[in-house]
Image: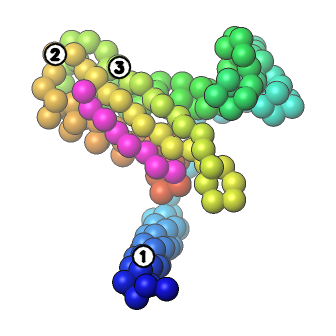
Amino acid sequence: MDLNLLNCLCNLHIQKSTYQLLFLNYYFNTQQDIMEKNITFTPLYTAKVMGTSGRDGHVKSSDGVIDLDVRLPKGMGGDETGKHTNPEQLFAAGYAACFGGALSAIAKNKKIKLTSPPEVTVHATFGKEGDGFGLAVDIFVHISDMEISEVQSLTEAAHQICPYSKATRGNIPVNIHVN
């Protein structure tokens, strides 16, 4: 084997190991911080949805508002009609609505009058991750008639309080784009 190639492979292995150690350090310190803060959770609302038969099934909320057939998307070899939803669409819809609410709450708290409602588009991407599967999220935020720097500031603050952002932080890649 070429000595330069061997050296390069060793350096890549060391970099990967370093990133793994940094991640583990971050993960365990974050878990410890949460336990030490003794955070109290006070339930305000519980959504109840039952799913049957997984990705080739049905989901229905206890109040009947959600009553949908679920299928694999066409891109994964599933539904050719495009008339059914999938878990990624449902997750993206929830995240977009929740993040939009967080943006509005931050604006209200900072006494910023929004002349138009925030537009939040979420791309939830399903993919292979190691031996299993995972999600990655891209959030696109647009607020008309507002400077990009102001939108960026509101978006960063919203990402700190949005329950979906809190739930995904450190678990899946979440990229935020302001336009």
Q: Which mark is residue 74?
A: none
Q: Earlier in the sequence, mark 3 or mark 2?
A: 3
Compute the Cα span from label 3 to label 2.
12 Å
Residue at label 1? 12
- The reply to whether residue 14 is visible in this rendering is no
The part of the image, by quadrant, that contains residue 56 is top right
Q: Residue at x 86, y 31 (%)?
A: 53
Q: Secondary structure at mark 3?
A: strand
- The reply to whether residue 115 is visible in this rendering is yes
The part of the image, by quadrant, that contains residue 25 is bottom left
Q: Is residue 178 magenta?
A: yes
Q: Amino acid at mark 1?
A: Leu
Residue at label 2? 145
Residue at label 3? 119
Position of 47 with respect to 148 (left or right) is: right
Q: Earlier in the sequence, mark 1 or mark 3?
A: 1
Circles 3 and 2: CB distance less than 8 Å? no
Position of 128 with respect to 178 (left or right) is: right
Compute the Cα span from label 1 to label 3.
41 Å
Residue depth check, mark 2 versus mark 1: number of the one nearer the observer: 1
- Magenta-drawn stretch, dominant element (helix, strand or loop): strand
